[in-house]
Amino acid sequence: MTSTVPPGAALPEHPDFLWRTPEPKKTYDVVIVGGGGHGLATAHYLAQKHGITNVAVLERGWLAGGNMARNTTLIRSNYLWDESAAIYEHSLKLWEGLEDDLGYPILFSQRGVLNLAHTEQDVRDSVRRVEANRLNGIDAEWLGPDEVAKICPIVNVSDDIRYPVQGATYQPRAGIAKHDYVAWGFARRADAAGIDIIQNCQVTDFVVDGDRVTGVRTTRGDIGCGTVALCAAGHTSVLLDRLGVRTPLQSHPLQALVSELLEPVHPTIVMSNAVHVYVSQAHKGELVMGAGVDGYNGYGRRGAFGVIERQMAAAVELFPVFARAHLLRSWAGIVDVTPDASPIVGHTPYENVLVNAGWGTGGFKATPGIGWAFADTVAHGRPHPLVAPFALERFVTGALVDEHGAAGVAH
Amino acid sequence: MQLITCPWCGPREENEFRYGGQAGLEYPADPAALDDEQWARFVFFRDNPEGAFAERWCHDAGCRRWLRAVRDTRTYVFAETRPYGSFPRRSARPERSA
Ligand SMILES: Cc1cc2nc3c(=O)[nH]c(=O)nc-3n(C[C@H](O)[C@H](O)[C@H](O)COP(=O)(O)OP(=O)(O)OC[C@H]3O[C@@H](n4cnc5c(N)ncnc54)[C@H](O)[C@@H]3O)c2cc1C
Ligand SMILES: [Zn+2]
């Protein structure tokens, strides 16, 4: 019987009703710009943890139509530095209880992540990261090639390929989730708490009074606000330009692709910075792959085919069995990249404008964690300790949180 | 894959080129005079417009020379490419493109 059920057919059904479609009010205590995962999670925790519900989430397109429902859904917390480990691990702990908290299926599957090492330098960096992770209480192991093959038998661990696998770090608690369900789960809870989710409402400018912003100008008229919380991902600098606030953000297209639906062949997540690809298998059966950003700044939500070609070549080298799979579709999102591959969260020169941006290629995993910490920051008007290291000022003080090693291709 | 017109080699495939980011940045004339804030601006802060952007590209897999382009970051269409340096040098602050 089960063999006749097509892959994906067992996904849970949605309720008939998810959220209201309200008209914008004249003014709100908090206006959140951006209805992606971070904006919606911030809204949920503002209501749940701080009792703040006179809140609007303004989304220029449709809910989760940005990076939230374009990403490859890898969730892990094995970052090198204490500051990053703290926020990503906090987030992972929230993921572990999120389905219950939201009362909504999110298909969180803790299937583990292997980060492959292919060179001596890779091996040293990886072992160092494993030790750093353990000191931070994060599950991490160093595995040799044979142990890699036990966890993921389809990885080619022979030594006659161009960049043989020398071993891997392994985080068993890492996983994937269903991104659109996550967004809808947060939206549904925020809506039920009385928060207005307003789609097709683009913020085009701000109403400024001295060093405060008293309202936002939108395609649906002006809306007054107490606090503005920017969660606009790749478009954050476009908005801050309107206020004359400069950030070190650069927006790039980031592509991903899926194969046709296949029987389960890939039990975990495999990432390789050196040959530049990462792969997991979605619940429905598609192989989901991605790599690095396209090299140039862009807002076009598409990238060059050469980038796809390179990651497919890397994937086929690592997983010879993929050679016969067909590409089903590819797409791109616009990600906001910072010089140290860490986010920018906290205050701006405008006292009531708070920013949450710069998560670049890796902010999906942070969704509950940053929603929780950003809501706390908004509610109290000061950076929560988890986000304090990620203030914009770090580019002046030089206290960068350089995660190029742990972020890199690995989202 | 789109073609980029190298001023020396003519139209060539995009993946022969390397991106060099915002054009028109000048090394500070008097580096010792800069404070931390000004260094941060010079090292880390770049324009990131949605629309026309003046940029540097290098024809890495061809003549290996730098060119200056104006490209629309929404459509990726190049309005122009020309040799880098064949335009008036600017000092002080990086130029802003709309
Ligand atoms: C292809 C791809 C793969 C990725 N893979 C991973 C991964 O495996 N793991 C991981 O952790 N992360 C991954 N990421 C990164 C992750 O998707 C982002 O860091 C994260 O989604 C950003 O937060 P968000 O969900 O709020 O962004 P978004 O969903 O992009 O939300 C921003 C919203 O703001 C809206 N907006 C913008 N301007 C305005 C305006 N002026 N007015 C109103 N609304 C506006 C946008 O329409 C958008 O809906 C990936 C990203 C991409 C593109
Ligand atoms: Zn050339």
Image: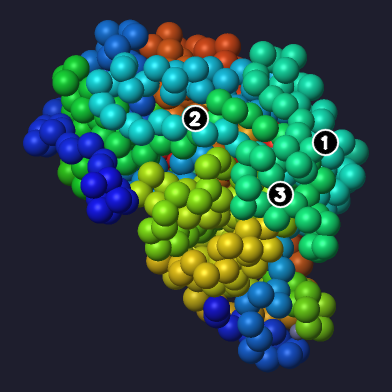
Which is more N-terminal, label 1 or label 3? 1
| In the depicted structure, whether residue A133 falls above or below residue B36 | above
Q: Depth check: give the residue in front, A251 or A137.
A: A137
Residue at mark 3: A273
Per the model, the C-alpha gap separating discs 2 and 3 is 21 Å
For disc 1, the chain is A
Residue located at (66% from left, 52% from top):
A155
Give the structural element (helix, strand or loop) at label 2: loop
Image quadrant assignment for residue B42: top right
Q: Depth check: give the residue in front, A195 or A192.
A: A192
What's the amino acid at mark 1? Asp
Residue located at (85% from left, 49% from top):
A119
Give the structural element (helix, strand or loop) at label 1: helix
Instruction: Point out the quarter of the image occupied by ligand 1.
Output: top left
Q: Farthest front residue?
A: A1
For disc 2, the chain is A
For disc 3, the chain is A
Per the model, the C-alpha gap separating discs 1 and 2 is 24 Å
- The location of residue A246, given as percent across then percent down, is 57, 40
Q: Residues within 10 Å of mark 3 (few under 14, many from 20)?
A: many
Residue located at (55% from left, 54% from top):
A290
Which is more N-terminal, label 3 or label 2? 2
Residue at mark 2: A110
| Residue A350 seen | no
Q: Is residue B54 left or right of residue A368?
A: right
Image quadrant assignment for residue A40: top left
Front position among marks 2 and 3: 2
Per the model, the C-alpha gap separating discs 3 and 1 is 12 Å
Considering the image in quadrants, where does the N terminus of chain B appear? bottom right
Q: Residue A125 carries which label?
A: 1
